[in-house]
Image: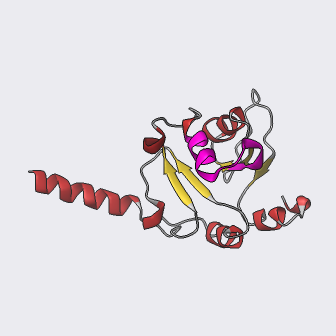
């Protein structure tokens, strides 16, 4: 039974990392890698190093490593500590208004909402730094073309 459980867990892990990023993700991250420090954080158990995103992030952190899941600040603090930067030097991108944008802002980070589905922004929250439908314009924005978003 233990061997079967191990086999099942290995299969789950392999399938969990078989993701197909949106078409804009890989080009945007490749353009940013080396220009800005990229750190991924997740509440899940995906292993970025075993996905199509491998090699694009300097570090990938999980809630398990931080001992708490977002919106708890522990995962953001772990990323900041690892990168050796202050919150004001960071930008967080995420697709959840509460777990990503609001949680990042509570830690002092600027945040952009990636809203691929055109959902309305929650009225009870202050607007994010920007709302984008995809990541295509991010490299131009980081290059100083503030109108790119």
Q: Which quadrant is the C terminus positioned in?
A: bottom right
What residue lies at 67% left-to-right and 39% top-to-bottom?
104
What residue lies at 58% left-to-right and 62% top-to-bottom?
58
The outermost residue toward the top is 124
Q: Nearer the viewer, residue 37 or 12?
A: 37
Task: Establish if 121 lies above or below 91.
Answer: above
**Residue 47 locus on image (x, y percent):** 43, 58
Q: Nearer the viewer, residue 55 or 20?
A: 55
Q: Is residue 26 magenta?
A: no
**Residue 8 locus on image (x, y percent):** 22, 56
The answer to whether any part of residue 79 appears in the image is: yes
Chief SS of the magenta region? helix
**Residue 98 locus on image (x, y percent):** 64, 35
First to last magenta residue range: 75-92
Q: Is residue 82 magenta?
A: yes
- Exactly how many numbered labels are in the figure? 0
The answer to whether any part of residue 114 appears in the image is: no
Task: Establish if 132 lies above or below 19.
Answer: above
Residue 48 relative to residue 27: left or right: left
What residue lies at 27% left-to-right and 61% top-to-bottom?
11
Residue 141 relative to residue 18: left or right: right
- Judging from the image, the colouring scheme is secondary structure
Residue 109 relative to residue 82: left or right: right
The outermost residue toward the front is 84
What residue lies at 51% left-to-right and 51% top-to-bottom?
61
């Amino acid at each position: 039974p233990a061997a079967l459980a191990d086999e099942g867990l290995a299969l789950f892990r392999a399938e969990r990392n078989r993701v197909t990023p949106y078409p804009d993700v890989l080009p945007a991250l490749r353009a940013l890698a080396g220009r800005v420090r990229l750190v991924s954080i997740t509440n899940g158990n995906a292993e970025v190093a075993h996905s199509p995103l491998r090699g694009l992030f300097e570090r990938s952190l999980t809630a398990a490593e931080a001992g708490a899941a977002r919106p708890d600040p522990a995962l953001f603090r772990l990323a900041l500590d690892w990168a050796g930067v202050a919150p004001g030097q960071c930008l967080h991108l995420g697709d959840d208004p509460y777990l990503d944008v609001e949680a990042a802002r509570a830690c002092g980070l600027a945040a952009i909402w990636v809203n691929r589905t055109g959902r309305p922004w929650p009225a009870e929250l202050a607007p994010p730094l920007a709302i984008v439908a995809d990541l295509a314009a991010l490299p131009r924005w980081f290059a100083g073309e503030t109108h790119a978003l």
